[in-house]
Image: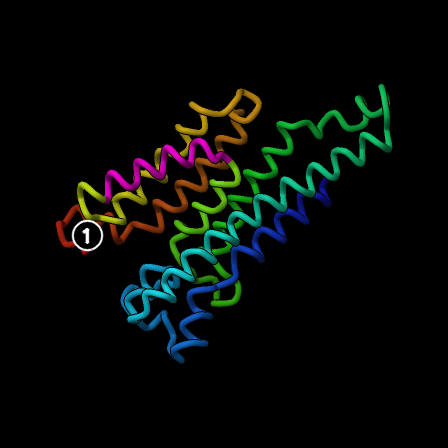
Amino acid sequence: MAKLVLIIVAVSYLLGSIPFGYLLVRIFRGEDVRLSGSGNIGATNVARTGSKRLAIATLLLDATKGYAAVMFAFWIANWYRFSLRRQFPGTVYDTRSAVMTSHTVFLLAALAAFVAILGHVFTVWLHFKGGKGVATAAGAFIALAPRAMLVVFVLFVLIVALTRYVSLGSIVAAAAFPLCVWWLNPAERTSAPILLLIAASSVLIIVRHKDNIGRLLAGTENRLR
């Protein structure tokens, strides 16, 4: 079980740490995106370099790596679970592998989501300085709890449409996601450890928006045009 957790953590972090925004701008424009705008490696700052196509590509790739991390966790945890069932059938399986339940599988997937976001925010390839984790979280959350993510996406769109603040939409969506998971998911997927990991992911995203929060309070945040 410990090896399984280590594999999921390692793969999720490495996937999340791929700095697609930095790589795309470096390859196609010969520039360092960290020297533009906010210095962030996410899609919003990539757009500030003058290439909307690269920004869209960054958004999609960042979301894909979060999605891939969670799907990998689901796959390997379920593989481990069913391999135990084959190895220890009947009562032996029940006693030797009782910890590997569907709840545990979902818990490991929630861990993968958190670690993938952590990898994006603190990427080892850029001296542990990365992005804000919104796109990576979106991909991870789609894989983790698609119904909750749909509600959160609608909320995000409404806030951005009403206020023209993308940052505000991201912050509110991140804060609402744990509540939506608790509301829409079955009990086995809303235990305290699972909600704690999801809440930690949301808090990490909100903390990364501290500068945006300051500008929102000061009335100097940039609006979407």
| Residue at 51% from the left image edge and 25% from the top image edge | 190
Q: Residue at label 1?
A: 215
Quarter occupied by the N terminus: top right
Residue name at image x 85 percent, y 21 percent: 90
Identify which amino acid the numbered label 1 is placed on: Arg
Q: State the residue lying farthest toward the bottom.
A: 30
Q: Position of residue 69 (x, y in %)?
A: 57, 48
x then y, percent, for residue 129: 43, 62
Question: Vertical placement of 79 versus 185: above or below?
Answer: below
- Report which quarter residue 74 is drawn in: top right
Q: Nearer the viewer, residue 151 or 17?
A: 151
| Crowding near the residue tagged with mark 1, few <14, some 14–19, many ≥20 C-alpha atoms within 10 Å | few
81 versus 23 height, above or below = above
Q: Which residues are magenta?
A: 145-160
Q: Where does the image place residue 85, in percent across and percent down from the top left?
A: 81, 30
Residue 202: quarter of image: top left
Q: Report the residue at 36% width, 36% height from top.
A: 152
- Please name whichever residue, 156 or 217, is drawn nearer the observer in this view of the structure: 156
Question: Going by the image, does 36 lie left or right of 179?
Answer: left
